[in-house]
Image: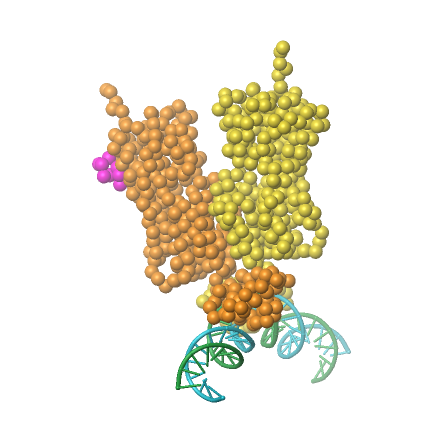
Chain colours: A yellow, B orange, C cyan, D green
Amino acid sequence: MPPTLEEVAQIAGVSRSTVSRVINNHPNVRAETRERVWQAIQECGYQPHAVARSLVTNRTRIVGMVIPETVTTLFTDPFFPLLLQGATEACNTHHYQLLLSLFNDPTGQEKTYQRVMRSGYVDGVIVASASLQDPVIPSLLRDGIPFVSVGRHPDEQINYVDVDNVNGARMAVEHLIQLGHRRIGTITGPLDMISGQDRLRGYRQALAAHDLPIEEELIVEGDFRESGGVAGMQRLLSASPSAVFVASDIMALGALKALRQENLRVPQDISLVGFDDIPLASALEPPLTTVRQPVRRMGALAVEMLLDLIEHPGAGPRRIVLPTQLVIRKSCREKEVMSS
Amino acid sequence: MPPTLEEVAQIAGVSRSTVSRVINNHPNVRAETRERVWQAIQECGYQPHAVARSLVTNRTRIVGMVIPETVTTLFTDPFFPLLLQGATEACNTHHYQLLLSLFNDPTGQEKTYQRVMRSGYVDGVIVASASLQDPVIPSLLRDGIPFVSVGRHPDEQINYVDVDNVNGARMAVEHLIQLGHRRIGTITGPLDMISGQDRLRGYRQALAAHDLPIEEELIVEGDFRESGGVAGMQRLLSASPSAVFVASDIMALGALKALRQENLRVPQDISLVGFDDIPLASALEPPLTTVRQPVRRMGALAVEMLLDLIEHPGAGPRRIVLPTQLVIRKSCREKEVMSS
DNA sequence: TATTCTTTTGGGAGCGCTCCCAAAAATAGT
DNA sequence: ACTATTTTTGGGAGCGCTCCCAAAAGAATA
């Protein structure tokens, strides 16, 4: 059985309270006592028992990340590695541990919620990219677990970190309009997700601002997956757009593949703008014009917001909306004036 | 403050021991008492406090997965999603939680080890694909934490799950020899990893079994990364191999890209065999002949071995070595006899 | 009805730690 | 040397649960 505070105390000739003070770097311990305790710790290989400590302090220094996606999707969508990098970095800075719960099928999510998030092992939770119907947020509200949503939420009481999806989409479509395009299509994100809705809103706002008609046949709902981009572009082509705003880079990749299958060149035959600016965007042929969102920073800020919430629960709602920027590469060109 | 056993007991008119018996499904509780307790639990929204329970039982029902790679590599190497799928599945089957520790730079690994693996939050650990120099295994041995290695380890006392890398590599090279190749190169895995060493051994054994000379200029050390495949093939081409055994599919992808850069066709100009059979292998052009290893199954078996170790610590060492199989697709062809 | 046996239930104690209050020791001032 | 003040240290108690022993209640038998 591993040594306890009491054993360290015995070796050092002090009480367990003194050992606890040393370990937790409390003041008012004599220097020679402190040194003797450290030596005793070294001698017996004492390691603090985090579970016992947690029972007393009501803290685990672990935060959970709920990603309502299966392992396969988690590893396919390049948004999540960046989010996790940012979250991991912020956790490490604050001496917290990120607990990532994985499941292989959607029914596993409820079980892992019960087993981990609700069981007291985490001080708080980050919910990444849930749809509005996802039951995890109502559950967290019911159970009084501090949490932050990555992605805006319409409920006033929910804390979140997001980017300005509306404005980002608007900039993308504005760019296409400035290039002379008038028949601009879009492949949206899932419309049960706020980011899906917001990017569509930005698309509509840009068209409306230029008195351009919003034609429903130019709007195809996607799903933030490559296959959704392929299918979306296949459907959209029948409406003959000269340019398309795709609500994510991974769908833009799919759209690009669909265009290649139809022997349509980007940007010669059709212009393309994505959203995200994942590393792949610059590596595509042609390099993709896209809306950059700082995913890593979102992850880090979500963690910091959550830690602040854990430490100061009473304070008011917290929200951070980060700006986006349009990164102009080579997947758009001016709309040629048709000779008649 | 969330309700405790005592509060449930008060509502139900029983003692906390009776409530505990009901929650843990112990026998010898009257049916009507049991029902009354469940109603009280429902009424007050009681949720078991896992930390308190863990302090008593010395169990958390969490197992840690240590992957000595940064987040970037974790998400780039397709081996890990499959491993995590298998591990996640086995954990869920046994009502355990997999805790995946992430870090962004190699120095973060030691900190996360201290913070989580050594602190009592996990009942055991799975170590995935560590190199022989990685300090995590000596630390686990020193701290007496039950663990299983994914990948063979030369230390007799270490439990592991692996595939037969030697035999897998030998089959791959045998295949090339049967097709008439005599000048067979290899891009190895990292040679500070057992699987890297074992696959090289299989390569050598196959050549030796056919009295073919082992020429060091035909052996290039790789790193299980796509970029390592690119660089490895670029170096190897100067030795004019007619076929190459690549110790992982992701490096085979890199090798393929390098060959394309040199306008060399697979299999017309050079034959290629990989190892892993990741989903990409069949999607390549040409579809890759490769050695299939059951990564998902490795993950699941590693978890099951660990849970068995946790429950029965005294039993002897455990080892599982899974067979591999050669999957013949279209990246190899017969060596043409050179007309002289 | 009484006794014996079985089933059901209650509560003390402890898991390993932190916190808080008070005791003990050390230091400063007269 | 004595007194007052400050610093250092010790130990009781409890965090929420499980386990174990024993008490209480119920059932069966004579």
Q: Is residue B208 magenta?
A: yes
Q: Position of residue B102 (x, y in %)?
A: 51, 48
Please say if B68 is above or below A199: below
Quarter residue A20 falls in:
bottom right
* Residue B130 seen in the figure: no
Q: Nearer the viewer, residue A243 or B112?
A: A243
Give the image quarter of residue A212: top right
Q: Is residue A8 above or below residue A270?
A: below
What residue is at 34 percent from the left and 32 percent from the top? B329
Q: Nearer the viewer, residue A167 or A98?
A: A167
Q: Determine the residue positioned at 35% across, 40% down.
A: B292
Residue B168, how many percent across, how many down?
31, 41
Magenta stretch, main secondary structure, is: helix
Residue A79 drawn at (x, y percent): 55, 39
Up/down of B175 relative to B7, above or below: above
Residue sitting nearer the eye, B120 or A243: A243
- Looking at the image, which residue is at 29% across and 39% down? B171
Q: How many marks?
A: 0
Instruction: Indicate the position of residue A63 as horizontal and vertical percent values.
Output: 57, 53
Quarter holding the N terminus of chain A is bottom left
Q: Which residues lie in the magenta part?
A: B204-212
Task: Say whether residue B142 is left or right of residue A145.
Answer: left
Horizontal placement of B271 versus A271: left or right? Answer: left
The C terminus of chain A is located in which quarter? top right
Give the residue drawn at x 38%, y 38%.
Answer: B277
Q: Looking at this rendering, what residue extends furthest in the top direction?
A: A340
